[in-house]
Image (tube, helix red, strand yellow):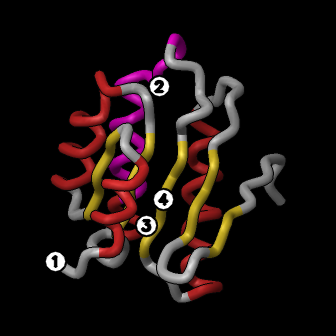
């Protein structure tokens, strides 16, 4: 049983997970990844928006944690899901995208919610 809660919003075509504003460690993000896997199995929806807009921009996620989590996400989803991350933290988004894409994931990060949702809903 998880010590974290990861409620999600089920939209018509995608799932949305909101990351609360407090500081999170790798255990939190691994648990979030597991919740994402379980939610896609439960709903059959393979498009996910992870909203990190409430996180503290002065406390970015460490690069090695991003690397390890990107590897785990590639193992969990590969190209079977489309994942967008909404974040005000622009400096590390390309690193997450690069590592995740190199592991077979279909991902995009950005700070504009509307454009990320538009990307999520595309069929290319």
Observer-nearest of 42 and 71: 42
Question: Of callouts 4 and 1, which one flags the residue occurring earlier in the amino acid sequence?
Answer: 4
Residue 29, compared with residue 26, is above or below; it is below
- Which mark identifies residue 61? 2
Q: In this view, does 30 lie above or below 66?
A: below
Residue 124: numbered disc: 1
State the extent of the magenta-drawn residues as a range. 58-73
Say whether residue 94 is left or right of residue 30. Answer: left
**Crowd class of label 4 (few under 14; some 14 to 19; many from 20; radius 10 Å):** many
Residue placed under numbered mark 4 in the picture: 49
What main secondary structure does the magenta stretch of the protein show?
A: helix
Looking at the picture, how far across and down is residue 43, in whole percent? 61, 86
Question: Would you say residue 64 sits in the magenta stretch?
Answer: yes
Q: Which residue lies furthest to the front in this view?
A: 114
Whole-angstrom CA distance, mark 3 to mark 4, is 16 Å
User: Is residue 113 or residue 106 the one in the foreground?
Assistant: 113
- Residue at image point 31% right, 54% down: 115
Left or right, 95 with respect to 45, comes to left
Q: Image quadrant for the C terminus? A: bottom left
State which mark lies toward you, 3 or 2.
2
């Amino acid at each position: 049983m998880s010590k974290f809660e990861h409620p999600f919003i089920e939209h018509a075509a995608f799932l949305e997970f909101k990351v609360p504003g407090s500081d999170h460690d790798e255990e939190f993000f691994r648990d979030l990844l597991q919740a994402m896997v379980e939610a896609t199995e439960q709903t059959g929806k393979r498009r996910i928006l992870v909203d990190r807009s409430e996180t503290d921009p002065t406390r970015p996620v460490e690069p090695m944690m991003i690397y390890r989590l990107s590897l785990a996400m590639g193992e969990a989803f590969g190209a079977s899901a489309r994942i967008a991350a909404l974040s005000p933290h622009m400096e590390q988004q390309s690193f997450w995208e690069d590592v995740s894409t190199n592991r077979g994931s279909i991902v995009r990060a950005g700070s504009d919610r509307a454009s990320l949702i538009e990307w999520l809903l595309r069929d290319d």
